[in-house]
Amino acid sequence: MTSKRAILLIEDNPDDEELTRRAFKASNISNRLIVARDGAEAIDFLSAAGAFAGRGAEDDPCLVLLDLKLPKIGGLEVLQKMRANPRTRTTPVVVLTSSTEEQDVIRSYGLGANSYIRKPVDFTQFMEAVRILGLYWMVLNEPFPYPHA
Amino acid sequence: MAVSTGITSVGTAPEQYTRAMLNILEDFSEEKDRLVDTQRAVLNILEDIGSEKGRFEEIQRAVLNILEDFSSEKNRFEETQRAVLNILEDFDAERAKTEGANRDLREAFESLRRAKEAADAANRELEAFSYSVSHDLRAPLRAIDGFSLALVEDYRNLLDDRGCDYLQRVRTATQRMAQLIDDLLKLSRLTRGEVEFAEVDLSRMARGIAAELQKSQPGRRVTFRIDDGLTAWCDARLLKVVFENLLGNAWKFTGKKERATIVFGAMQAGGTFTYFVRDDGAGFDMAFSDKLFTTFHRLHLEKEFPGTGIGLSIVQRIIRRHGGNVWAEGEVERGATIYFTLNPHQGAES
């Protein structure tokens, strides 16, 4: 595993947050999970601004799990801002959301998402999805070599 | 003085007169010749004029004829003029009528435009609603399902079998609700987007879906009889959904038969094709045939034949968007036939 860098979960629903933690645990994904509960908070965290001004580079996430429907600033705008910022330009972003509305899928990929997963209602399936996702991005995938490309 | 000097120098006076006289005579004779010439020329001219006169008379006659003709033309022209005036008068009346009709037409267009605007607004609202349903209604279901499973997994020792069974029921119901939401979204998506008409080979489409069904359960003994060369002017993407549902239903409701036959064919009457999909499966009671197309209304138990009851509503919606009609015939345990028409003229001009 890549030096156990943090995973950033951008999710406003505490139930989904808890279920995601549970699924991570069940799949033995031991990376630290940082949670941003709305789009504005996520952008501040990712660019080390606002309440997160001066946070260390060691908190730069190695993977972002992004919900699309978020308070304040939506997921697609977060993604757009991430891709415009050199610090997060190459960070893998997996859109993890409820809908498979075609427009959401198209826009997500258009803005540079690496993957798009619809959260299944069946929790058994959800855990399986998280397990595969962790295995792929934390173990199989070779990340971009420099943290701030 | 000067004159007398001149005369003196020329000659004597009588001689001078004689010569002058002679000169005059000579001049006169010349003049006479010229006069004769002139006279001859005049005579010639007169002669010419004589023949010209003949021609002139002819011309005059011709002109008179023309004038005569012209006069009858003039009469005719006046008649024509009168006719034209009548027509103009009629035209005025027609124009007034046309203007009235135009006004009516403009008003009709205007109300059509307003209706379209309202429909567009309703569609946009529906889209926003669907988007919200697709996002927001599923999240609580995930929590219900997830935490039910967490209870079974983490607190198994605190629950008896009945407790576990109840939680399992909670999960089953949750997943069914998720399926219903997905089906509703599918149905609402069908009302969005344009219907794109093209010539579509329905026989080929039906064969493709039949092959997929056979691949999904290779053990089943089902004969597909699909008529050749059935085409229609319709939206290929939407008609594929129709066939997936109709052939899928036929496949499902023949599932308990040892052998089954599924037919796709068409009948023609007065230029209109009626297509049908027929099976010899579980069928249905005709007393409930009107309920067949109601969303989420089912005529069979979930445990007999699984499903949410959305398929035929989807079919009906698509067929109606094509200006066609759909109806069913059946008998319990003797199969069902679903008939449909597609308005062949709708969209044909565009």
Image (tube, helix red, strand yellow):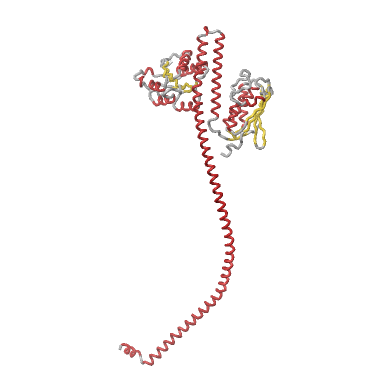
Q: Is residue A7 above or below residue B275?
A: above
**Does residue B300 appear to the left or right of A12 in the view shown?**
right
Q: Position of residue B4 (x, y in %)?
A: 32, 90
| x 35%, y 18%: residue | A55
Q: Is residue B310 above or below residue A5?
A: below
| x 55%, y 26%: residue | B186
Q: Is residue A139 above or below residue B119?
A: above
Q: Residue furthest top?
A: B157
Q: Is residue B3 above or below residue B95?
A: below
Kindly indicate the quadrant of the structure image that contains residue B220: top right
User: Which part of the image, by quadrant, shows the N terminus of chain B?
Assistant: bottom left
| x 38%, y 20%: residue | A45
Kindly indicate the quadrant of the structure image that contains residue B320: top right
B47 or B119, nearer to the observer: B119
Q: Is residue B210 visible?
A: no
B301 or A96, nearer to the observer: B301
User: Which part of the image, by quadrant, shows the C terminus of chain B?
Assistant: top right
Q: Position of residue B325 (x, y in %)?
A: 62, 32
Q: Is residue B47 visible?
A: yes
**Total marks in image:** 0
Q: Residue furthest left?
A: B1
Kindly indicate the quadrant of the structure image that contains residue A146: top left
B181 or B291, nearer to the observer: B291
Q: Position of residue A86 (x, y in %)?
A: 38, 25
Q: Position of residue B91 (x, y in %)?
A: 56, 51
